[in-house]
Image: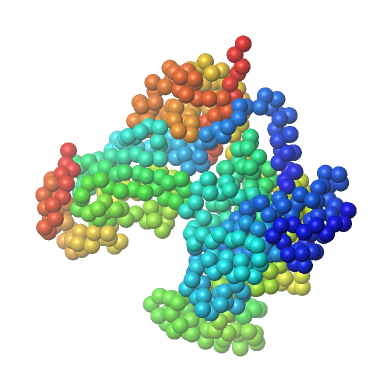
Amino acid sequence: MASTTVYPGSEPARWKYLDRIRTRAGPFTDGDAYDGSMVAEAMENMTVLVIGAGGLGCEILKNLALSGFKNIHVIDMDTIDISNLNRQFLFRAEDVGKYKAEVAARFVEKRVRGVKITPHNKMIQDFDEDFYMQFQLVVCGLDSIEARRWINATLVNMVDEEVEDSYKPLIDGGTEGFKGQSRVIFPTVTSCIECQLDMHAPRAAVPLCTLASIPRQPEHCIEWAHVIAWDAEKPFPSLDKDDPEHITWLFKKALLRAQEFNIPGVTYALTQGVVKNIIPAIAATNSVIAASCCNEALKIASNCAPSLGYPNNNYMMYSGNDSIYTYTFKHEKKDDCPVCGNLARELQVDPAWTLGELVESFATRPEAQLKKPSIRAESKTLYMQSPVSLEEATRPNLDKTLVELGLSDGEEVGVTDPAFATVSFKFKLKFKKTE
Amino acid sequence: MLKIWSMKKEQQKAENAEGAAGGKKKKVTAAQLRVQKDLSELSLGSTMRTEFPDPDNILSFILYVEPDEGMYRGAKFSFTFNITPNFPHEPPKVQCREKIYHPNIDLEGKVCLNILREDWKPVLNLNAVIVGLQFLFLEPNASDPLNKEAAEDLRTNREGFKRNVRVAMGGGSVKGVLFDRVLK
Ligand SMILES: [Zn+2]
């Protein structure tokens, strides 16, 4: 039923339309199971982490605050540069030099009453699992693949099958010029960032023959000056991409070539961009992608509509290069993914076995077939075949039983074997019930 | 929120009729598993060996190197290896425990080896680092120095540098600096 209940901390006018969506059952909500009266309160009690307070991050923070999230943390180690001001709209000229996370947090807090944003002027790698445990949802607006891979691996590794709170959905946005993507990852359940690495293949280089004979675009002329003319004429001993004199030389060369082929569009800024491999950041792309990410966050948090991620589509590609085009599809999880493909498998063992018997059993188990396995638990090195010093130190363990070694039911062990250089196994020990 | 987690739990319960006892179980970390794998593939040969002060902590160990050729032969050097939880996204932290006369190792034991710094990649393994260290003793490199005086010495007067290395390894002093005795 339509109700006009006002929830604590919300200003009726500002939240009126949001509450219509999140408090009423609709065609997309899950029939009887949907209890709209709980949603606003549940969202107010949730803590969301935003990674990155740059072009995407500014949009994401603003959108999440306006979507009814009340507790937000943001991590970004960067400070504000004057070149950010054209699109990172939470920053003003007087903020140049200050921390992005801090300024963005204060700005949004001031504009959206009742939201609390905690900034962290740090790297994501400065925090441990205990820190990440406090969040129910992670939204990434990053420009670095390395940082994405790190947070992805961390969230996948945090999953403890018996603890519901250990599953942190990851919503990831990314943009490059007029293109972008948003995707939702349910760690260990759906395809992860690592499974999707091939979606970030480096852009194909323009074939050298195009540069040499038939340039069609201003970029081709610049690449020609950069790759061919520079090498032929060697105007300076080595190319310094930050030296305006060098860029000017390339720009003039490119311009001459462009005139020869009647190609417009070669400018100094474009020359600099192509040579330094800079892709322009487009404010509109950021806002489209951030909107999509925050839409998913609202859907996941409120269940007001099915989100991306499970069981079907989990990846939305956007392109604004030639008019507007989006394509949403399901990226499949990879069984051999080094991050989410290597989940611990259950292994039935008898706690009265000696470690030696367990080690021998790996040779015959069809799921392992390891001849020279080394085996460790999280805080105990059980048996290592090499190096010599570790083999000697751990050999006495072979005669001890699993119980004597302090292993417990459900504990995880890592098993490696030099014969299988590319794989390592994780097993979860399941103790056989003793009669 | 997150109906999906209840679905996942249902699915797991079906697969595994006996749910394990509660409480968070300790899990092998990605860094540990990777180090375990690297250690089991290590080829140390006759000139190197490892020592683990606490065998249960494989993220911290000592590597002994005893070059059998080149100007550092006859000595025994040791390095501490400390591996962070971010391995292999971060290189291991390696430090020489003795004060030695070497263009690529400074007096505090910091090591200048490209793959321990800017050229580190997660596909590299501990074996690559160990081979790199061994190589530093066979071919000290004057072009990328940490100890600038030693590098200058090597570049301008190779024979004099060799003599200074012998003096330093014997525990003598070179250019007013006293070195640790590392000769066996
Ligand atoms: Zn994966």
| Picture quadrant of residue A115 | bottom right
Q: Give the percent coordinates (x, y) of residue A364.
A: 57, 21
Q: Is residue A87 above or below residue B169?
A: below
Q: Quadrant of the C terminus of chain A?
A: top right
**How many numbered circles are shown?**
0
Which residue is painted at 52% across and 15% down in the image?
A: A352
Q: Residue A105, can we see it?
A: yes
Determine the residue located farthest toward the top in the rendered image. Answer: A435
Residue A425 x %, y % = 55, 34
Q: Is residue A332 left or right of residue A270?
A: right
User: How far across and how far down the image is residue A367, in percent?
Assistant: 61, 28
As rendered, which of B183 and A308 lies closer to the eye? A308
Residue A253 visible in this rendered orientation of the protein: no
Residue B109 in the figure: left or right of residue B129 = left
A233, A344: nearer the viewer: A344
Residue B120 in the image: above or below residue A159: below
Q: Nearer the viewer, residue A398 or B152?
A: A398
The residue drawn where x is 79% and y is 64% is: A16
Colouring: rainbow
Task: Say which residue appears at 58% left-offset and 48% top-offset.
Answer: A134
Q: Is residue A247 above or below residue A101?
A: below
Q: Nearer the viewer, residue A122 or A427?
A: A122
Q: Is residue A266 left or right of residue A407?
A: right
Q: Residue at x 56, y 59 (%)?
A: A118
Examine the rendered structure and indicate whether residue A270 appears above or below residue B123. Answer: below
Q: Give percent across and percent down for residue A260.
A: 61, 87
